[in-house]
Amino acid sequence: MTFKEQIQQGIPAILPNPKAYDTTVSHAPKRKEILSEDEKKLALKNALRYFDAQYHAALIPEFKEELEKYGRIYMHRLRPDYEMFARPIEDYPGNSQQAKAIQLMIQNNLDKAVAQHPHELITYGGNGAVFQNWAQYLLTMKYLSEMTDEQTLVMYSGHPMGLFPSHKNAPRVVVTNGMMIPNYSKPDDWEKFNALGVTQYGQMTAGSYMYIGPQGIVHGTTITVLNGSRKIDDQGTAGKLFVTAGLGGMSGAQPKAGNIAGVVSVTAEVNPAATYKRHEQGWVDEVISDLDELVVRVKKAKENKEIVSIAYDGNIVDVWEKFDQEDVYVDLGSDQTSLHNPWAGGYYPAGISFEDANRMMAEEPELFKEKVQETLRRHAAAVNKHTAKGTYFFDYGNAFLLEASRAGADVMAENGIDFKYPSYVQDIMGPMCFDYGFGPFRWVCTSGKPEDLQKTDNIACKVLEEIMKNSPKEIQQQMQDNITWIKGAQENKLVVGSQARILYADAEGRTKIAKAFNDAIANGEIGPVVLGRDHHDVSGTDSPFRETSNIYDGSRFTADMAIHNVIGDSFRGATWVSIHNGGGVGWGEVINGGFGMLLDGTSEAEQRLKSMLHWDVNNGIARRSWARNEEAIFAIKRAMEEEPLLKVTLPNIVDESLL
């Protein structure tokens, strides 16, 4: 069968032979055993719904074994034989160009060069899934190959509910992930209901088909490191040391971001497969496994003001403690381990091998939790010693401070309510970017041609340079940082997987860049382009310990903005939309959403991009301005001056002395 025919067949009428376990790819750890005997039977019944009754007797023992061995039913037998990667859009079968674009984006999320655990359909973050099992993948791709622009595919936590009649201006796909009743949104609820096969953790861009590899966060991390350095002094970044952890998924961007920012960086990672994968991909310069050797190398790099990224093959706690003992001064510190997922592979205890920790996680989950919390207390204590010497430490929105506080670590401020260290959104990303409307805009060249990506880089740079000529002084630094980024994008070799680019931009920048792309498509200069963004943006995410952590009017624990955002995107022209529970800081801690939009060079695409991109940014600025954020008030007033139809309620500021 051809590739197109395999997509069109969906779940095969005749079951394929079982697949051998592939040891050459990274696999998800075994999940904890949480189901009762009756619930295990229910999980099997749920999985068997995808198959004709004639196969149930054969599949029951196989799926039972998967559930016992992995803690989940992945249906490995159904994993396709074809190579998984983002093909040129014309290679996909279908009646809808928009649906073909979504097929491309799904396959990119499952590319073994991109995904963290590709055979378990997990893209990043330890549990950020595209689908729960391979039957869902096959059925979804079949629906996408059949649908027209008069239908919408509804996705229920990885499960394709089916195609429903709609219209050409409706989204082609509507995605929800993990939308639990609030009282059933604890970590163990995810373990249970995911094992039952009725929900999944979509992270942010995993379950919304918008992941573009570690590049997706490298720009934001670069901005964070640059501005973190500026908060320390005005002496530039040369010779400054940045210490952090995590190389598995999006955290793999940290070494590259450190290089672009011009610092010495040390990133610890406990999983050797992840460490050496990033090294082979060129995302980290050196790998060191010995702490004494690491100290010598870092001191030399600082002294010579090298720009170098070093991966430490081991636990981050050992690095912080060793650097304290050896008096290695750390300028900037953070952490990007997956602490939204602390008990299922997101964070590993010190003093225990990676293999033994994985065994303990599955077989002795309570002991594993105890060891993780013990390590978090050590971790925080070591960081505190460095900050006492002057280190600027920030939480990177991965729930480090949240989980450390729950473990009893010394991370609370004197008032006993706030953390003693800021979130990077509180100190950097919120006031400097989000409040002004700048966020992680991105695009994918569906032709798969590197030359198309180069052309879009040039177009975007030209647009930004033109905008900057008339930009107010308040956003000149942001504009210059973004122009510098896009000019260096090709040289920095950021592409992993699809021909994609990320660029922080505000509503004006996004709209003008998108229109310029659409014009270039219409003129035959480039192929169709998919627009999107990270959910980690101005408007898409309500997350009290990350994206909305610089909201101080008491509303940061509400989630109206993210819901408004996805509803508004849906009827303003998005090709697909998604809304998720969980992502970044964890299940039950955040509501986040995103979109995808195909530009095809038509006037209809231009109308959609102008309508949707304006809303997608400004609804978040409006919320931030109502919270009395000074930068957001400035930005929304400017937006209202430029668009007469925009009328936003502004806050009146109370004289503090009256209170």
Image (cartoon, grey):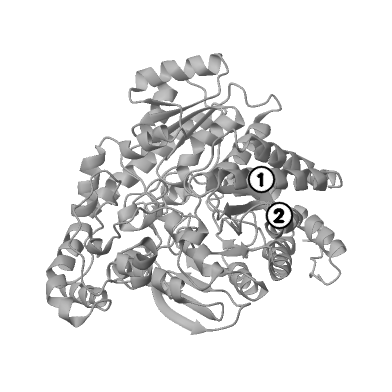
Q: Are marks 2 and 1 in contact (CB under 8 Å)?
A: yes
Q: Residues within 10 Å of mark 1 (few under 14, many from 20)?
A: some
Q: Position of residue 49 (x, y in %)?
A: 26, 79
Q: Nearer the viewer, residue 638 or 457?
A: 457
Residue on which disc 2 sits: 520
Which residue of the protein is positioned furthest toward the bottom in this rendering? 165
Left or right: residue 148 compared with residue 140: right
Q: State whether residue 526 appears in this view.
A: yes
Q: State whether residue 184 appears in this view.
A: no
Q: Position of residue 91 (x, y in %)?
A: 46, 60
Q: Disc number at residue 466?
A: none
Q: Position of residue 95 (x, y in %)?
A: 51, 73
Residue located 32% across and 45% down the image? 372
Left or right: residue 303 compared with residue 103: right
Left or right: residue 451 compared with residue 360: right
Q: Quadrant of residue 648?
A: bottom right
Residue located 78% across and 46% down the image? 475
Kind of element beneath mark 2: helix
Q: Nearer the viewer, residue 372 or 526?
A: 526
**568 relative to 642, above or below:** below
Q: Residues within 10 Å of mark 2 (few under 14, many from 20)?
A: some
Q: Position of residue 193 (x, y in %)?
A: 32, 70
Q: Nearer the viewer, residue 264 or 107?
A: 107
Q: Quadrant location of the N terminus? A: bottom left
**398 relative to 386, above or below:** below
Kind of element beneath mark 1: helix
Under mark 1, the amino acid is: Lys
Under mark 2, the amino acid is: Ala
**107 relative to 370, above or below:** below
Q: Quadrant location of the C terminus? A: bottom right
Residue on which disc 1 sits: 455
Q: Which is nearer the N-term, disc 2 or disc 1?
A: 1
